[in-house]
């Protein structure tokens, strides 16, 4: 996107604000789905061996999913006094 914005030969509608916002939304959703699917894969990986062994990766992947969601801004927790 940066190359498209800085190149003077690119047509103007390509570098408009709406186009760049749409590209950011598509990229953000794709990244979020990729992280979520990776954590789901890690969480379900050990269940094939045994139920007791699968509990630890499931809990750790669940905590990582909550942490990643909060860092990416998907989980909006209101602060006190705001």
Image: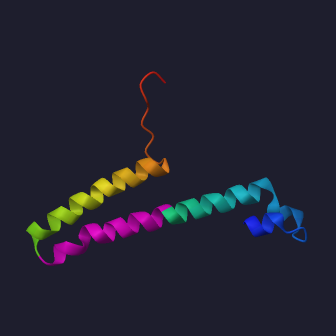
Q: Is residue 9 above or below residue 13?
A: below
Main SS, magenta residues:
helix
- Rendered location of residue 30, percent (x, y): 53, 66
Q: Is residue 33 above or below residue 78?
A: below
Residue at position x 51%, y 64% from top? 31
Q: Nearer the viewer, residue 82 or 14?
A: 82
Q: Is residue 66 above or below residue 77?
A: below
Q: Nearer the viewer, residue 4 or 30?
A: 4
Q: Residue furthest bottom?
A: 49
59 in magenta: no
- Relative to residue 63, is residue 22 drawn left or right? right
Asked whether residue 26 appears in the rendered view, the answer is yes
Residue at position x 46%, y 64% from top? 33
46 in magenta: yes
In the picture, the quarter occupied by the N terminus is bottom right
Segment tinted magenta in the rendering: 32-49
Residue at position x 90%, y 67% from top? 8
- Rendered location of residue 39, percent (x, y): 34, 65
- Relative to residue 57, is residue 9 drawn left or right? right
The quarter of the picture where residue 20 lies is: bottom right
């Amino acid at each position: 996107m940066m190359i498209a914005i800085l190149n003077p030969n690119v047509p103007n509608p390509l570098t408009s604000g709406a186009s760049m916002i749409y590209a950011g939304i598509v990229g953000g959703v794709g990244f979020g789905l990729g992280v979520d699917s990776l954590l789901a894969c890690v969480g379900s990986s050990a269940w094939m061996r045994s139920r007791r062994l699968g509990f630890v990766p499931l809990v750790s992947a669940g905590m990582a999913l909550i942490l990643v969601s909060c860092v990416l801004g998907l989980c909006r927790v209101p602060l006190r006094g705001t």
